[in-house]
Amino acid sequence: MITEAQFENYDEDEENEQEQSEDEEDSIIVKDSNGTRLNNGDSVTVIKDLKVKGSSMVVKRGTLVKNIRLTHDDEHVDCKVNGSQIVLKTCFLKKS
């Protein structure tokens, strides 16, 4: 049986864990091929022709990708290219 004091401590511990996980997400620094920091919503340009795994699609060099979303990994960004949702490696991108 949980007493009222234990219940209050549980809520505080849970809030602290959530704050720590949010801080860890904010601490990930994502950089493009030139070392420029990327943020959610940025526009980037592809610097090399890229074949998309599992598809016959090729993302051509110079393609502008708008409104990128950062992932939990500092080497990948989530985005839409030609109507397809894909993940691109940051080493093939430069900030526009």
Image (cartoon, rainbow, N blue to C red):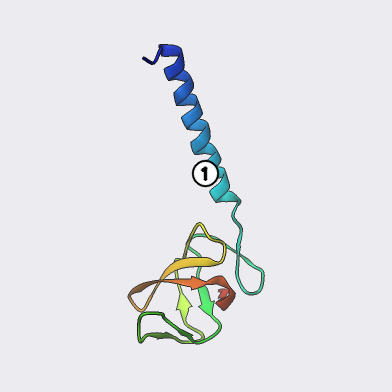
Count every numbered label the image shows and give the total. 1
Q: Which residue corresponds to mark 1?
A: 22
Identify the residue at image location x=56%, y=78%: 92
Residue sitting at the far left: 83
Q: Position of residue 83 (x, y in %)?
A: 32, 75
Residue sitting at the far right: 35
Depth check: give the residue in front, 7 or 78. Answer: 7
Q: Position of residue 62 (x, y in %)?
A: 51, 85
Q: Residues within 10 Å of mark 1 (few under 14, many from 20)?
A: few
Q: Position of residue 56 (x, y in %)?
A: 35, 87
Depth check: give the residue in front, 86 or 7. Answer: 7
Q: Quadrant of residue 93?
A: bottom right
Depth check: give the residue in front, 62 or 84. Answer: 84
Picture layout, residue 2 above or below residue 48? above
Identify the residue at image location x=52%, y=43%: 21
Task: Using residue 36 as the reference point, say whether residue 11 is left or right of it.
Answer: left
Q: Position of residue 45 (x, y in %)?
A: 52, 78
Identify the residue at image location x=50%, y=28%: 13
Task: Using residue 91 as the reference point, say whether residue 4 is left or right of it.
Answer: left
Label 1 is placed on what type of residue?
Glu
Quadrant holding the N terminus: top left
